[in-house]
Image (spheres, helix red, strand yellow):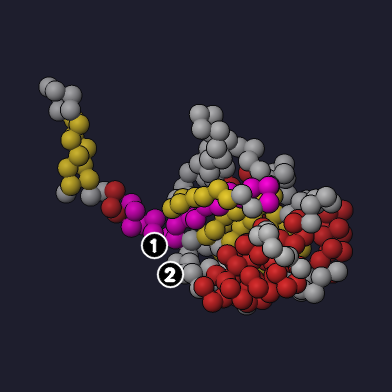
Amino acid sequence: MKLVWSPETASKAYLDTIQTCGISTKSSVAEFLSAMAAGYSAKLIVEAWKSDKINADSISTSIGLAIATKHNCGRYVCVVADEESRLEYVGAMQNSDVCLPEVVVGQAEEVMERLNGVDFLIVDERRSDFISVFNSARLSHRGAILVCKNGSKIRHIETSKFCWDNGVLDSKVCVVRSVTLPFGNGLEIAYIASKEGIQKARKNTNRWIRHIDRSSGEEHVIRR
């Protein structure tokens, strides 16, 4: 089993988010992530939230994820750093027309250890522990969608671009593809392979043999 895209579900979540948040002509993070989470039928959505009193996207994104959870009949957990953040988050969400998700207070490693099978993870890069959240996540065997929002602090020295395998993710995690999108202050998105996909990739790798000719120094790659 792996994550499968459903355009119909994505469209419904997209439109519901626009209606609930009052988003108009310009595309925003909220409806995009809502459609993405719903379209991939995410059963466990986790958001590592950080307050942003200037930008309304910090709570509208959460509203969109709550809407996606409703369409998926799944579970949505919001992780906050402290009690002050929890009170602010709950207060903001209660002013909307969506159901309040599970809100968990604590350190990244402790909280993520209790959440098994995450298939959609959104982390605000302004959190000081955002790398720990990604590294501590116990991802679903179906694969997962990882989203880092609000800029790019971790950048590859040569390309000046965000790099998922540059300390952000554990080396055991297999990134199938990644993309940078200009929504909000920037979204970095990675699609993580399912357990089945990782096994196939390893199997295909073993079908090739590298041989170096000692006399000429030439390298030959031979298929078994």
Q: Which mark is residue 207?
A: none
Residue 139: name its quadrant.
Answer: bottom right
Residue 192 in picture, x, y percent from top left: 48, 55
For the question of whether residue 53 can be seen, the reply is yes
Q: Which mark is residue 1?
A: 2
- Report if residue 185 lies within the magenta region: yes
Q: Is 91 positioned to the left or the right of 178 in the image?
A: right
Give, as a single range, the part of the protein colored magenta: 184-202
| Secondary structure of the residue carrying numbered label 2 | loop
Q: Secondary structure at mark 1?
A: helix
Q: Residues within 10 Å of mark 1 (few under 14, many from 20)?
A: few
Kindly report the distance in space between the C-alpha atoms of the residues bearing marks 1 and 2.
Answer: 8 Å
Cβ atoms at labels 1 and 2 below 8 Å apart: yes
Q: Name the residue: 66% across, 60% down.
A: 27
Local crowd size for mark 2, using a 10 Å CA cut-off: few (<14), some (14–19), many (≥20): few
Q: Does residue 113 appear to the left or right of 144 in the view shown?
A: right
Residue in the image at 22% along x and 45% along y: 208
| Drawn side of residue 79 relative to residue 121, left or right | right
The single residue placed furthest to the left in the displayed view is 215
Amino acid bearing label 2: Met
Where is mark 1, residue-wise?
Answer: 196
Q: Quadrant of the N terminus?
A: bottom left
Q: Residue 195 in the image: x percent, y percent?
A: 43, 60
Q: Nearer the viewer, residue 23 or 189?
A: 23
Q: Is 169 inside the magenta-drawn segment? A: no
Residue 22: quadrant of the picture:
bottom right
Of all residues, the one furthest to the front in this rendering is 25
